Image (cartoon, helix red, strand yellow):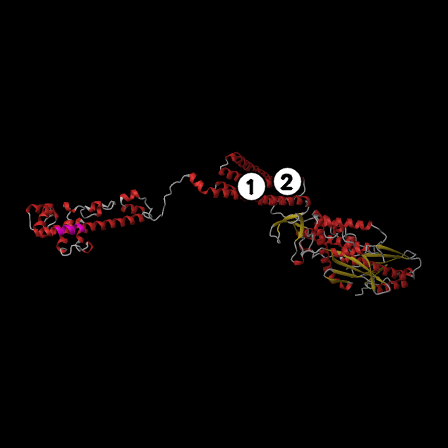
Amino acid sequence: MSDEQGINLALDPNLITLPLNGSTGTTTTSPLEMDTAAGTDTTAKPKVSLVDNPHEMYGQMPLAQLVPLILQQRQIPFSQLLEQNIINSMSGDEQPFIPEEQTVDMAESGALNNRRGQDETFASIRANMVEQTNVALNEASLALETVALLLSATRESNAKASISPFLKNTVPLRSLNSDSVLQQPSEPLDDLKFALGWKLKCLDDCKNKLRREVDTLRATLEREHLYWRKIGQYIKNSDVVFKMRDKSTGLKAIALKFGYEDSGSAYRYDRGIAILRNRPESDMLELVPVASTRDGPRGFQEKLLRVRIFTKIASEEDYIFSGESTLQDNAEGSVFNNENIRGQISKLKDIIFEKELMYQLKRECAPLISYGVSIENENKVVMELPNEKFEIELVSCDESSMANHDHDNPRTNDRRANLFLITLRMLLIVQFKKNIRRGLAMNVSSSRRGPEDILLLRPLLAKLRHQNYKILLRMIIKDNFLEMVQGSTVEEQDNTPRDDAGTNSARVLDRHIYKLNSEIDAFNQLINYPSTLFTLKTATGEALTVSLELPNYCNAKIEVSYTSFHAKFSEFKEAEEFLHFLVNEYVNKSQPPLNQGGEDPPLSVTSR
Amino acid sequence: MKLSAAIEIRTSHLTNSCTVTPGKLRQRAEGMQSPYVQERLQSLETIDLQLCSMLQEVSEVVFTFSEIKRGNVDVKPQFTQHVTRFYSLLNESTGKLRDEIRLLDENVGKRLLPINNVSKRALGQDDEKLQEQMKLLQEVLEGPGEHPPPTA
């Protein structure tokens, strides 16, 4: 029969409720029941589809429900339900619808023709029906297989429950929707052959890249080694170098500190830091000063101090240029273009030193305007004295060196100008030392001292003024004493205090402070107020002393003493008058004032 | 694949070492010019070069490897040789670098300042300047004395 040669798919036997070979009359009751139902209702239209048959439900009924139904219909217990019984009842009760099973029995009886025709119709309907049922079942089971196969990708255990053994054996699970594709291990040789070209190319590229890297690295290392070798060559142990980020290039670099900050400088506008950089194009080491914030884009200017002296022409109200300090030897031209790192360092040191000197000079000079010291501009301080004028100017190295070579013939005051400048520099160093001392002493005797007074120009100014005052005083003494008193002599003695009292007293225990004190004290001769003592002697040996002092480096203080007279003046005119009076009243009369008027109180005259 | 990974590791090793060395060199720079420091600089330079040639060996390794893959089996001993050289260089430079670090550690506090927490100060520049000016003063005073400072 056709259903025997169906699709080669093993159907789940559980799904099959109809006998595959119904003609043999299987024991199952459901087909019989269904057949009876179909027979009663569908005689008129045998082609009717099984789906539309309402009695199909009997066929789909599980046996457990169907059997009770039959039993109920027959009114018999289950034990009496026999196959033969059913067959008999079907042939007895419903003669016209006798199924095929009956035909075997009926053939012998040779029944009616009518019945035979009916049998044929029934058989054809039934065959048709069985065929369609099988097709439907096949389709349903196919659909189930598909679903099971699809499901196997995600829920393997569920799928295994419903999938047919045949499919399970022939088709790998999860394979339908390509969720997992089983990879067959391929032959390694085939694999290599397939990608060999790419791999070789890759290796070649790799090699080339590496070689290039080696080359660039070599070059970089070469330059780096050169850099280090140069640093090793030029940088001394005493130089302070540290790591710093080069702001212009953003690279790490080595910076060198050339400022005097750690050596006592109080100048904060330029820290004095330069970066040691390898100039990329020429592989030369160069020292680039880090522009301080104040200087801004103007950068670091090569400027040094220069002192010029102008002498007043007595007849005219004019000055002539009489002397100029020479710039320092190591400041010839611009050393920044060659690789003389030591030269560059010392030049940078010079420049920053001079810069600070100028800055401190300006600070010191601000209140000195009444003594002829004025700040002409940012880089120039002028000190005027009755007969000459000093200009201290911060000049650019290039300009000055050019101007310097124009007239090389020495002038009268060149030497003085040099000495003047050197003294200023030394005084600034003394200032540094004082700052260091203050920093060290801060722990010991905290803020006992106020801020250190800047003493740069004033000691020099005092010396010069003192010199002038001395000349004036000599004239006064000559006019009023030497020429008035017979046989008199005058002795002049420099009375400038040599040591700063108390700086190195026994209680200074710190040896560093002690050292600094002695170093500073070495300059006391220069720093302390200049003072001169004139001792006037008459022929009889009577002494009269006149002392000249400049207690604030500018104003003169004249003290005249004669036995018990002690008079102080700040005006020369008054001093002269007093001297005149003394000479006339006492010295020339050879009468010591004590003998005459012992009750006279000591004169103490101060003009202000 | 393994080879390129190995190359990657070595390259990074090399670059790392290279970035490390300048820092080390700098600390040497603080005690410049003594023969000891010059020696250290020289030695670090050698390490640098060794690391660089390591990279070159790697490139050779890759080259011979690709030759072998092309079917040129004769270069196999060269391949082995390059790999051996690479590892020996790595070994040597690592050892040297360790020695340098050890030397650095040993000398801190003796020849060198502690590296990070102490900054060297530019002391004594005042005295230097003073000496310089003294010398200058002496020169000026001993120089042609035909123009003594006029007293009036």
Query: Would you say residue A570 is visible in this rendering?
Result: yes
Image position, residue A363 (x, y; %): 72, 60
Q: What amino acid is at disc 2?
A: Gln
Image position, residue A377 (x, y; %): 73, 62
Residue A546 sits in quarter? bottom right
Magenta span dominant secondary structure: helix
Between disc 1 and disc 2, the foreground one is 1
* Separation of residues labelled 1 and 2 (CA atoms): 20 Å
**Dot 2 falls on which chain?**
B
Pointer 1 residue: B55
B80 left or right, relative to A285: left
Q: Is residue A193 a member of the stretch shown in magenta? A: no
Image position, residue A316 (x, y; %): 85, 65
Q: Is residue A121 a member of the stretch shown in magenta? A: yes
Q: Nearer the viewer, residue A600 or A190?
A: A190
Query: Would you say residue A80 is visible in this rendering?
Result: no
Q: Which mark is residue B42?
A: 2
A186 left or right, relative to A160: right
Where disc 2 sits, the SS reads helix
B78 left or right, relative to A481: left
Point 19% across, 56% down: residue: A52
Q: Are marks 1 and 2 on the same chain?
A: yes
**Dot 1 falls on which chain?**
B
Query: What are the residue bounds of the magenta stretch?
Result: A120-128
Image position, residue B132 (x, y; %): 75, 49
Q: Nearer the viewer, residue A287 or A304?
A: A287
Residue A234 sits in quarter? top right
Where disc 1 sits, the SS reads helix
